[in-house]
Each structure stands twice: as structure tokens, then as C-alpha cells.
Amino acid sequence: MDLRAFGEAFIAMLENIGIPEGWVLLINWILGALILLVVALLLAIFLIWFERKVAGRVQDRLGPNRVGPWGLIQPFADALKLLTKEAITPDNADRITYNLAPVIAVFHIIMLFAVIPFADKVVGANINVGVLYLMAFGALGAMAMLMAGWSSRNKYALLGGFRVVAQLLSYEIPVGLAMLVVVLLSGTMNLNGIAQGQGGLFGLGWYVLALPAVFVMYFVAALAEGERAPFDLLEAESEIVAGYNIEYSAMKFAWFYLAFFLNTWVLSAVAVTLFFGGWQGPGAAQFPILGVIYFFIKVFIMFFVFAWVRATFPRLRIDQMMSFCWKVLVPMGLALFLSVAVVLKLGLPDVATWALLFVANIVILVVTLKLLGNYTSDLSRTQNKRLFAPELPRL
Amino acid sequence: MTVPLSWYLIFATALFSLGFFGVLSRRNAVAVLMGVELMLNAVNVNLVAFWRYLTPTDLSGQIFVVFVFTVAAAEAAVGLALMISIYRTRKTINVEEINALKH
Amino acid sequence: MSESIFNLTWLIPLPTALAFFAIILFANPKKRLSSKIAVGGVIIAWILSWAVAIMFFVNPEFTEQPFDLAVPWIPMGNIVFHMGVAVDAVTAGMLFMVGFVLTMIFIYSTGYMSFPGHLDPEKYPDAAKEGLDPRYSRFFAYISLFATGMLGLVVADNLLMLFIFWEIMGLCSYLLIGFWFDKSYPDPKQITPKAAGLKAFLTTRVGDVLFMMGLIFLFIHAGDLNFQNIFANQEFLHELSTTTVNLPFFGAVTWAGLISMLIFWGAIGKSAQFPLHVWLPDAMEGPTPVSALIHAATMVSAGVYLIVRMSPLFSAAAHGGSGVMMFVAFIGAFTALFAATIAVAQKDIKKVLAYSTISQLGYMFAALGIGAWVAAIIHLLIHAFFKSLLFMGSGSVIHGVHHGHEHAHAHGHGEGGHEEYFDPQDMFNMGGLLKRMPITGWTFIIGGASLSAFPLITAGFWSKDEILAHAWADGHMAVYWTLAAGAFLTAFYTFRQIFLTFFGSPRTEAAEHAPESVRSMTWPLVALAFFALFGGFVAVPVDFPVVGGLASDFLAKLMEMQGEFYGLHVAPARFDWTPALISMTLALSGIVVAWLVYGWKPLKAKQSDPLRRWLGPVYTVLENKYYFDELYYFIAVRPTLWLASFFYLFDRGVIDRIVNWVGAFNRWLARTLRRWIDEYIIDGAVNGVGLVTTWTGAVVRLIQTGQAQNYLLILLLSVVILLLLIPFGS
Amino acid sequence: MVGQILFIFIAVVTLLMALGVVVARNLFHAALFLVGVFFGVATLFILLEAEFLAMAQIVIYIGAIATLIVFAIMLSRGMMGKHLGKYNKQWYFAGGAMIFFFGLVSWLLVKMPFAPVSAEAPADAIQQIGSGFVGHYVVPFEVASVLLLVALVGAIMLARERNS
């Protein structure tokens, strides 16, 4: 069954009715956008439940279990609760900006859904610059949070805003580098093309086999991009209370909450597309519907890992986070990029290229962590000393 | 392609004019910088429009836009750094008061 | 694949250039590091140049369309001047030789540049403790720059780049000859390194100016200086050789003749041909690696290389009826014989080699003059190997004798008390060194045999024989006999040198205690000796009995194929027994005569040269190099000095007086006028101008607000006005 | 037809945003309007089938430049220049000149005889741009990279607090 057939039949129908071509296209676009929007929102509801369940299990709790079977209806109850609460706007706040921020926060992520290939060619907009599109709209998130932080007229919110810029902008570089490496290997920026390129070995020839270190780099940076523990410094309760969304309540807060989960899901989806074959799997090329299933299974496994990490690790200090990005991830990303470019230029047969890439990845990963990891940890240790052991005046 | 080329050009001209107006008349140096960014964007629109309508097979227009991007990025970085530096030494961000050219 | 190696050609001069900058900027205080950087750079350059050269050798089809990679350099109106690199057979041959010789000499220099004897160790305690020259790093920087110049010259694809690298080499030559600029001699008439450097620089300048004029003329006519564009363009060359220009004194000459003559003068200067040969012997004041590198193997042969490059132009000029080829042949042959005679009477081990270099370069020019440019280039390559070997050997000998002298002196064997000046380069202070320095000795003998064209087993025989065979076959009897006489003398002075230096018994304490040189100096000697012996097999004529069948003569074939591309047709000289036997006989008899004079009964200490007795005044003339330095002093230097002092006197006596008088008059005038004009008219005018200026300024300053936005507004208004010109202006 | 309506819609919104940039009294609002303008221009790039540039526009202008400006404004309160009047003394004159300029240039543009070529945009535009950067435009590309590096170092040096 080809999912494309639906779309084509629909277009044919509209054209038969006698609507001009341009309008058909427009209607089609709008409908596609609506479908994605609904999918995304439904997904988010489920994701909240999923993550809470995982976190509960990790922390030896049950998680939500009261409303509905296994607590499945819990998110709806939460949503209702948030809807009925009072939506506070601080007196001093910059109203338009304040109200616009959550909207942008959610919609920049929903726009990312447009380019994610759910199955072969089942993709909202099969554009040639998909990877760049991800980077571009991912970057909008920082703007939304800046707006929220600034417009709240709250000291902690503003501090949270600063951290947003520092963290998201910094970690965008490793994420971008990791994406570029994959682009280099696959030779296309089209996400569906990247997924198609991993069809070897009966749909198991995933790029993670050749680029394990790149995946590790992407994963770590994605944790930071998704503001997830151990990089959730934007909302570190112990330091800046709740960060940029401190003044938000009720439904406006719910939007940020929504954005947070959707963002994580999109990051997992991108990870799956770039490194784990996307919709690829045994038989996916023949039966596209299998692709959708494979894709969602993989994404949820990836999402589970995200949730697992979040529930397990404690938060980093901000200087550790920044130096880890600039002193470990960025140099490592550059080294990986260079190594992949060189290996590809050698023009070896595929198997040899992949083997060589794998070896190069492992070597670079080990070397980087050994050299730079030691360096940064030494650095933070000395800073520890200066921060917490001031020289006392001698009596 | 149903849109005529001149529409893009007029749009770019309007954007350019607005940006230039900002550059000419705003007091705040950061606002002036924003005006400059508007002007650069107007130029980019022009370049891309000319590429699409006049030489669609030769991508020099697009490549040039990328160079404009780099220049804009460098300009913003250095410009803002300069403003912070000026603000720190002169305690003002008013372009009218930054008139060392006169002396 | 092979093309892609040629794409690396432009990298060849780069490593040494980087080494130069690295040493100058960063590594200068660290002597060992500097030498390592320089050697590393030159080894990379060597590998690259051999890769390119060998790729060319194994693919002769590249001669049909030589590689050329150029990028736009100087746009001039409609013409865009390109710079780039080209590889053809000549370049490949030169790269093969230059890369290798450069590397050998660099390695040799690391050992040779120990603490020099003329410096006071107490003034340079650090350097003396290390045992290295105080300016060790600087030396390596200079020779790295020189290597850049030479490699760049070889790979350059146009005459302008060639000229630039040519001048870089000239500069390095100047710097390196005068490297020990603080050295002086007790004999005031002996030239110091500083003066020698100046002399070399100024003498070559004469040639270079003419060369540049030739370049300019060529550019005016061709609109381009790319070798392949100009020299493979037969129509253009033909046109150049048929259009004439009227010159004062010379009458009508063809442009081709004029240009090639001017350019040939550049080669005369660089390659030290008569009459601009005087600088090369004095250039021996530089450190010996420099003599080996610059003044034997590479830079001086650049002149020959230039003429080889220009051969299509020369032959076009000859076709157009110009005598420039004859002139080249004459200069070459004359220099070959003339320098050989001087070499016979020299006592300085390096001076002999210097004159022999001049003489051998003369052979090459003679070959070029008779159209045998293939023989010339092959002799150039082989000569570079054995002559750098000889120079490095002589450096090793000097080093050894110097150390022996210090050793003897330190042990109290010296003459005692206030010691007289000891010259470690004087061959009459040596003798019997073969036992003391076996590696140096045997490699020197191999080089010497090669230079004196010892038949059959040495490279020099084959390459020199090629030239002689061509001269004979083409009927240039005068050239042939001059060169043959030169060959006899060459063999004689070479073996005179060998017998004086290495055989017999030591004539001084120093020679008795001379140690063998360090390994970094002897290994390059061995490597070069290999080429001095076997390098000649690239030039064995195919129809030579027995040996001819073994060697393929591939280099000459390659060169001839390349010649076809440039429209040069060189018929390979048929092997002929007559000239071969004559030259063999002459070479062997030269060796025998040398043995009779110096080898049979070795000279005793303090015994003078037996030739002096037999030749009498002729020997004195030869010893004084035909008094050319004195002649030039009288006809060039002295008149210049006279003119200068005359002008000085004129300046003092006449001009200054007039100036003083005018000054006095002016003062008087001023004093008179001040009262009348100054106080009323001038002051009034000045004040008025001031007032007007103040007033104008007061008005205009309103525009200058110091605010960028105001200025921008004015800019906008100007743009609007300019835009209005579009619809309304025209 | 749809294209024209889309264009008019985007152009009008973008120009209104641009107007907002120059008239907004609050600098932060001006910066947000600037983001809107960048976004509008990016959509225009998409209409012009230059997807790569559209994405690059968003990454660079919104992701970097606008964020930088906002960050700078937030970082130092004085940069907002709250007490400053919005415009300087010449603003009415500048505005008049700009309107005249706009009218003049638009008129000229309409009169100008351009000859549009109706060809498809190349499908491998990104590849062509990429090979352009490392091929024909390699020197400008390298110079641009050096420019960015210099700007980076220069900006840090300028904005650094001197601790002496």
C-alpha cells in the first residue's frame, strides 16, 4: 500500500472539481500542515505519559497509574487542569512578546515535522535542504525563549534567557557538524535521501555503523539542544528557579511544556533518520507501511533513551557544560568531519570506506575524550578550587 | 514565475529605503545597525531575484548572496562589539553624541 | 594520474620558501633546528621534483603537449598576464638534477658550517661552544631562499617569473658570497668576501639590465612571456626574425637578433662568460657549499638553461640572418679555452675549480651556439653533478687542512711565536691527503676524472664528447679545435690539482694532521660520485661500440622530442671515431702530462710550481688572470671614481659658489624689499587670506557635524542626483 | 495567481515589519520585527526557488545575527537607550528624501527593460553552489572565511572587559 496514493487521489479529485492548479497546491499544503499539526499534538500528549512512566520506573516508582488504564488518560487530565487555571500576565510584562513566545516555541518545532520522513516519500515537504531546514528552524527556539525571558520582566527569567543563548547557540555547532558529517557521507541534504541511503544490508546499513562517534556527539549535543538533563540548565530549579518560563502559568506554560516534549521527539526522530536508517528496515522498501512502523518504533526507543538519561543523570554546572561543548565536542566534530572527508576522498569500495570510517571514528572518540576530556576536567577542578576554597587571611 | 521581476525589485527598493531611513534617522546605534541589516537583506532579495529571472542557470547570484551573509555576520559582530565598547567608554549609545569625526 | 602529479609542480618551490620564512621569523636563535627545517624543506622539494621529473621521463608522450598550469596574475587592459608552472623535458631534467644536488648540498652544509677559523671564539662564546658558525641559521635561511629561487626558475612557465627568480638567486648569491662579511686578510690586495659579493652583484647587474631590456622588447612584440605560447609559435618567431630595427652603430638588425642578443647578455653575466667572468673566481670567498651550490651546479647554469629555453628564438634569429648564434659559439668556445688556461696557473684549490666551471659553462654555450642544445643541457646536468662533487670535495679538504692546522698549532708543532698567515686553500700547502682523507680523496678523483673526461667510465666523457662530436659533425672546426685544446688543458689542470692535493707527501704540518670530514659531509660526496660516474649513460650515443647498445640514450631522445614541439630539429650526431679518438687522446695526454709534471716527482714543501720555471712570464700573466681585474679597474672603476671626484670638485668649486652668491643676493634683496612690500602688501594679503579663510570656515563648518548620519544623508542626496541623471541626463 | 497573492501577502507583511523596525520605540520590539523581516525575506527566497539561501538566511540572520543583537540589547540596559528620543534632528528630511528615492528608483526600475529568461531553476543548485565555492570562487570563499575569523577575534578584543 502506497501512502502517496491517497495524496494523489485527493489532488486528482480537487482538480476534477475544477479548482485551478495553484489553489489545489495551496489547499494540499494547508491540509498537509493540518495533518502534521494534529499528529504532533496527539504525539505530545502520549509522550508526556511515556516519559513520566519511564522516569517513574527508573526511579523505582509506578508513575501515573490512576486515570485510565496504566494512567494513559493522565495527560488529558493535566491538560484540563492547566486549561482551567488562571493565565497570569505580569504587570510589567511586554504583553505581545510575552504572549507570542510560547506560540513560537511550539510552532517552530511543529514546523520541523514538515521535513521528517515517516516512510519512503511520506514526508510533509520533501525539500532538498532538509538538514539545513532542521538547523534553521531549530535555531528559532532560542529566539522564542529569549522573548519569553526578556518579556517577563523577571530577573530569573532574564538569566534563563542568557543561558538559552549560551547553551543553544553553542550546542548548535556540534549538532550542525554531526549533521554535516552525515550529509558528507550520504551526499544529500534531503532527509528522505539520507534515509534511502541507509538501505544496505536489507535495510540495516545504518550510518551509525560507520559513524558511531558522530552519533555519540549528536546525541550529547541533542541532549543540550533539547534542554534535557544533564544539560537542563535553562530551567535549573536550584539556580534560577525555572528559567525563562518562570512567569508563565496555565495554558501558556503548557505550550512550553508541549514544545519541550515535541522537541525531544523531533531530536530523536532526526537521530533515527540520520543514524538509524529512518524508516529503513527489512522489507521496508517493498512495503512502505512497514516503514512507518519501523520509524515509530525506532523513534520511541530513542526517546526512551532520552528519558532514561534524563531520569538518571544529575545536572552539570554551567561552565562545565560550556567547556564541554567548545573544548571537547567542537574539536571532535571538526576532526570527525575532516576524517570523513579524507576517507571519502580516497575513493575506496564501500565496505572498506565504512570500515575505515568506523576505525577513524573510534580513534577520534578515544583520543578526544582522553586528551580534551582530561584537560577540561583539570580545568574545572582548578576552578573549583578558586570558587570554593578561597585563601583565608592568615591570623 | 507569475510574479513579475519588477515586483521583487520594488519590494527590495522599499526594504532598502526603510533600512536606509533607519540608518539616517535613528538615534540608537543598535537601531542603526538594524537598518544596515535591512539594507543588506534588500540587496540579497535583488540578487536572488536577478538570478532567478535573468540567469537561472548560472548560480553566481546565489553565491554572491552567501558572501553578503558572511559580510553581514562579520559586520553585526564587530558592530555590536564596537557599540558595547563605545557604550562602556562614553556611556552613550546615541549616534548624535558620537561625533569624534568633528574634532 | 600522472597529470595529477604535475598539478603538484607549483608546490615544488614552496617548502624551501616556507623553510626560509620559518627560519627567519621563528627558528633563528636555534641553530640545529634551523638546519633541520631547511633540510626538511629541501627534502620535500626533492621528493616532489623527482616525482614530477620521473613521471615525465617514463611518459615521453608528454613532450607533445607539455604541462602548463597558469593562473591570472596581472591584468593589463586586454592582456592578462598569467603566472604558472610548466613541465617539459628540459624542466624535468633540471628538476631531477636541481632537487638532488640541492639536497646533497644542504646535508653537506650542516656539517660544513662549523665555527669558522677567521672568527674570534671569545666574541662568539655560544657559537664556539656549539662548534657552529654564529650565523648558522642565517646561512640555512639564505640557501633555502636560494633553493626557492632555483626551483622556481626551473618550473616557471614565463620569462617574467623566470626573471624574478633569477634576481632572487642573484640576491642570495650576493648575500652568500659575502656571508663572512667580517673576514679580512693580511694581504690588502686579496679580495674580501664583502667586496667579492659586491663585485658579483654589480657585474651580473650589467648582464641583467640587458636581459631585462630584451624581456621588455619581447613582451612588446609578443604581448606574452609564456614559453610555450611564444616559442612554439612558429609564425610569430618567423615574423620576429624578419622585421628589422635600425640601431645606431649596428645598422639594421632583426628583432629576433636584438632580443636574443640582449637576453644572451643576461646569460653571460649569470654564467660568468667572458667578458663578465671576473666575478665568479672571487665568489669563491663564500662558504664552499655556496660555491658548490650556486657557483657550480645551479645558479651559473641558469644562464645555460635560459639560452636552452630561448633556443627557438635563437634559431629563428639565425634563420633570419643574425649572427647571434655565432656570437654565442664564439663566446662559449673562447671562454672555454681562456678560462682553462687561467686555471692551469692557480694555486687556490677553489679558484682552479672556479675557472674550470667558467670553462665548462663555455663548453655549454659553445654547444648552444652550434645548435647542439641537447648536448648542452646534458652536459649541464652532468657537469652539475661532478662539479658540485668537486667543490664539496675541495670544501672537505679545506675543512680537513684547517682542522689539521689547528691541531698542529694546538700541539705546538706550529712555527711558534707570532704565526704567519696560513692559507688552508693553497694547494701547495697540501699533498698526500689521500691517506688522511680516503673518502674525500677517492670521490674527488672520480669527480676530477669526470671533469677531465676520462674515457668510457666517467659521465663527463660522454657529455663532453657529445658536444665535440656535434662540433665536428656540423663542421664547426674552429669551435671543435678550441674546445679540444680546452679539453687537454682541463685534464691537465684537474690532475695537477689532484696530484698536488692528494698525492705525494704532506708539505705542511696541517696537511699531515688533516682529519677526514664528518659523515654528513662525506655521504653526499659518495652519492654525487655515483652520478658523476654513471650519470653519463643517459648520453651514450646509440651507435657507440659495445656500450652504446647497453644504454638507451633516452634523455637525449626525450630532449629531441621536446625540441620538435618547439620547432627545433636537432639531428643526433652520428658517432664518429675521429673526433672521439682525438678528444680521448687529448684528455689522456693531459692526464699524463700532469702526472709527468706533478705526479712523477711530487713537490717538496715550499717548492714552487715547476710550470713557473718553464712558462716564465706567461705563467705570471695566467696567474694574474690576464690582468682582467686590473683592466676593469682601469677602464670601469677608475674612471667612475675620477668622474665622481671631478663632480665633487665641480660641486664644491662652482655650484656651491653660485649658490652662495645667489643666497647673498637674495638676502640683500629680501632686506630691501621687506620694508616696502612685506609690511604692507604681503602682510595685508596674508591677513586678508586668513580672514577670508576664517569666514569661509565659519560657514562651511556647519556642514561638518561629525555625525555619520549627516554625511550619509548627503551621500543619499548625491546618489539621488546621480540617479536623476539616468532619465534626464541623456 | 496564487503566487502573486502569496507574494503580495508576504511582501506587505515583510514591509510592515520593516517599518516596525524603524519606527519601534522599544529596541527589543525593533529586533523582533527584524526577525520577522528576515523570515519574510526567507519566504521570498523560497518563492524564488532558492531554498538553500532561504535556510541559510534563517540560520544566519535569525539564528545568529538577530540573536546576537537581542543578546547585546539584553546584556546592557543602557544599550536600550530608553531616555533617547527615537529619531535625530534630520529625520523628517531623511524621510522625505527616502520617499523620493524610493519613488525615483521604482520608477526607473519599472522603466528599465529587463529580459527575463523563463528557465527552470537547476535541480542540483546546492551541488552547484558547493562546487562554486571550492571551484571558481575559492579565493573569495577563503577570503570570506578569513574575514569571519578576523571579525571574530576583533569582536572579542573590542568587547572584552579590560581588567587592568
Image: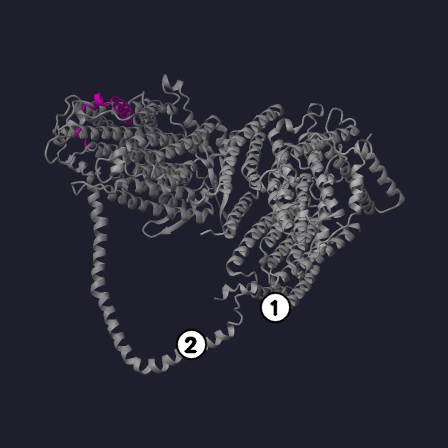
Q: Secondary structure at mark 1?
A: loop
The stretch of residues the image draws in magenta is C425-452
Residue furthest out toward the right? A17
Q: Is residue C429 magenta?
A: yes
**Foreground residue, A310 or A203?**
A310
- Which residue corresponds to the image point at 43% horizontal and 37% vertical from the top-left? C14
Q: Is residue C424 magenta?
A: no
Tell me the residue that label 1 is attached to. Answer: D90
**Which disc number belongs to residue C690?**
2
- The chain under label 2 reads C
Q: Main secondary structure of the magenta part?
A: helix
- The chain under label 1 reads D
Determine whether C197 is above or below C348 in the image.
below
Q: What x and y, as percent, mark residue A160?
A: 63, 47
Q: Is residue D38 visible?
A: yes
Q: Amino acid at mark 2?
A: Gly
**Foreground residue, C507 or A310?**
A310
Q: What x and y, as percent, mark residue B87?
A: 54, 58
